[in-house]
């Protein structure tokens, strides 16, 4: 076979694409002359109408012939299309069951929350993230000050964590400008800011961005009020601003004694309260104890609805202590803070890391005044809170994080075991799905970290 014969189908595709462009140009030229220049001579009008009709015909032929040429390439094996009917059927079945999955509400903010959401979306489509809007630092703080909008950073991260999008799109939205007036600003923040500009309010902007990125579940700001965090330190000094609180606690060598929000009567979104009422499980954390989790509980009626809910209430403890917020804290200390601001019945179960890290990493974190959060099971049980422990550590680029896949496994298994056993048919079907999803996640990501 001659080379030209081998290339012939591909050459046809290119020719018809060029032909299609010619048709578009005819339409554009004819339409522009008719509308823009307003030619009244009947002969010229007929001529330009004819150009439009010809352009439409040319475009139709080009599209039809291009499709035929592509099909020819497929049939001859030049383009390989693999349609695994069993795999497609399996994915459709999983999607159907994910829609029936447990209704999980997660409350928090920061990178910890988005890390958990990345794993959780594989197990249920019914995820609602209620995200703090107290951030006033970095690029979010700049947009908050310049545009008077709510901080987009934490919400952007949660949207991307739940999005069904290509890696290049995520890289684009997470990209931070390195120079100029936009230095250190995230493109995703600007995208959300632009959405806010064409929307009636910030909530609508979040919904539009979620729709564009095909988000699994919902992402909701806890309030639309211009909420700011205020902390009183043990030395009596008062600090305002989410970004300033831990820094000042470190600088003044004084722990946080009390946290409040301004305005104190900030109103929650109606959708947030409805999600809490309908939830099978309410999850708090992981994330900054005061500035990401507790700040949400201080918004009017949020803590009350969590306490009233019949859902299983779970706290996911951080792996490492956070300088300026939880220095020297054990797991029980985290829980005591939640009970102080959210009420006695705010937590039923605590998911706790039982894994260890290398001495080298311990030394590295010690230099940053951070250490592993101590697991004190007896003190946790004395609070009336049950414990679920597992090795949840993942090391990435020398940083200790939660393993999002393993955490999602433990979380979903806990919810199914403790909350949904009353429905035997549902539990059997869903646990079967859960095992299939775990296997698929392992295959896609090369195995869960241990």
Image (cartoon, grey):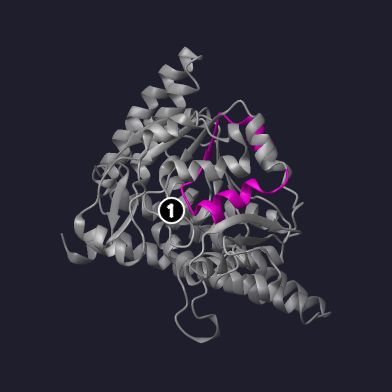
Residue 28, x across and y down, in percent: 64, 73
Q: Nearer the viewer, residue 264 or 32?
A: 264
Residue 429, x across and y down, in percent: 42, 20
Residue lying farthest to the bottom in this orientation: 180
Quarter assignment of residue 9: bottom left
Q: In this view, does 425 lie above or below 183?
A: above
* Direction from residue 148 to residue 356 in the image, left or right: left
Q: Which residue is drawn at 51% across and 14% down?
A: 422
Residue lying farthest to the front in this orientation: 235
Q: In which quadrant of the rendered image does the C terminus lie?
A: top left
Q: In which quadrant of the rendered image does the N terminus lie?
A: bottom left
Question: From this viewpoint, is residue 85 visible?
Answer: no
Residue 297, x across and y down, in percent: 63, 46
Mark 1 falls on what kind of element? helix
- Residue 294 in the magenta stretch? The answer is yes
- Residue 315 in the magenta stretch? The answer is no
Q: Nearer the viewer, residue 195 or 44?
A: 195
Q: Is residue 32 above or below residue 424?
A: below
Quarter assignment of residue 342: top right
Question: From this viewpoint, is residue 201 visible?
Answer: yes
* Direction from residue 422 to residue 369 in the image, left or right: left
Q: Residue at x 30, y 62 (%)?
A: 366
Neighbourhood count class around disc 1 (C-alpha, 10 Å): few under 14, some 14–19, many 20 upward: few
In magenta, the rendered stretch is 274-300
Residue 63, x across and y down, in percent: 49, 58
Q: Which of 240 and 258 is in front in this view?
A: 258
Location of mark 1 (residue): 67
Residue lying farthest to the right in this orientation: 40
* Direction from residue 160 to residue 80 in the image, left or right: left
Q: Which residue is drawn at 65% across and 62% down?
A: 230
């Amino acid at each position: 076979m001659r080379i030209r014969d081998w290339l012939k189908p591909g050459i046809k595709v290119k020719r018809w694409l060029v032909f299609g462009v010619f048709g578009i140009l005819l339409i554009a030229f004819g339409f522009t002359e008719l509308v823009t220049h307003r030619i009244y001579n009947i002969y010229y009008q007929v001529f330009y109408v004819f150009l439009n009709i010809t352009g439409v015909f040319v475009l139709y032929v080009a599209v039809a012939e291009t499709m035929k040429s592509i099909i020819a390439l497929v049939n001859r094996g030049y383009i390989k299309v693999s349609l695994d009917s069993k795999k497609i059927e399996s994915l459709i079945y999983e999607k159907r069951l994910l829609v029936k999955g447990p209704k999980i509400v997660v409350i928090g903010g920061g990178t910890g929350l988005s890390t958990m959401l990345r794993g959780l979306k594989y197990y249920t489509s019914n995820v609602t993230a209620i995200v703090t809007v107290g951030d006033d630092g970095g690029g979010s703080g700049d947009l908050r000050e310049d545009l008077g909008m709510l901080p987009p950073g934490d919400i952007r991260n949660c949207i991307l964590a739940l999005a069904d999008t290509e890696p290049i799109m995520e890289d684009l939205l997470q990209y931070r400008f390195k120079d100029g007036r936009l230095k250190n600003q995230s493109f995703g923040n600007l995208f959300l800011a632009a959405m806010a500009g064409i929307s009636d309010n910030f909530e609508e902007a979040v919904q539009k961005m979620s729709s564009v990125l095909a988000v699994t579940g919902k992402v909701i700001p806890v309030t639309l009020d211009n909420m700011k965090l205020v902390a009183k330190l043990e030395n009596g000094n008062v600090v305002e601003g989410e970004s300033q609180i831990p820094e000042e606690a470190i600088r003044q060598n004084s722990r946080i004694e009390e946290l409040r929000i301004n305005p104190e009567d900030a109103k929650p979104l109606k959708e947030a309260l409805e999600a809490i009422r309908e939830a099978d499980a309410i999850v708090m954390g992981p994330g900054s104890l005061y500035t990401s989790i507790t700040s949400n509980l201080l918004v009017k009626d949020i803590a009350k609805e969590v306490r009233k809910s019949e859902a299983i209430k779970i706290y996911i403890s951080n792996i490492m202590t956070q300088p300026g917020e939880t220095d020297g804290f054990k797991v029980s200390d985290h829980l005591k803070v939640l009970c102080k601001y959210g009420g006695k019945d705010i937590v039923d179960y605590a998911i706790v890391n039982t894994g260890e890290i290398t001495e080298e990493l311990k030394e590295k974190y010690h230099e940053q005044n951070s250490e592993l959060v101590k697991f004190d099971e007896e003190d946790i049980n004395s609070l009336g809170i049950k414990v679920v422990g597992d090795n949840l550590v993942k090391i990435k680029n020398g940083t200790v994080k939660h393993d999002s896949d393993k955490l999602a496994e433990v979380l979903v298994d806990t919810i199914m075991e403790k909350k949904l056993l009353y429905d035997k048919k549902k539990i059997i079907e869903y646990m079967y799905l859960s095992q299939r999803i775990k296997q698929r996640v392992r295959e896609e990501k090369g195995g869960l970290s241990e």
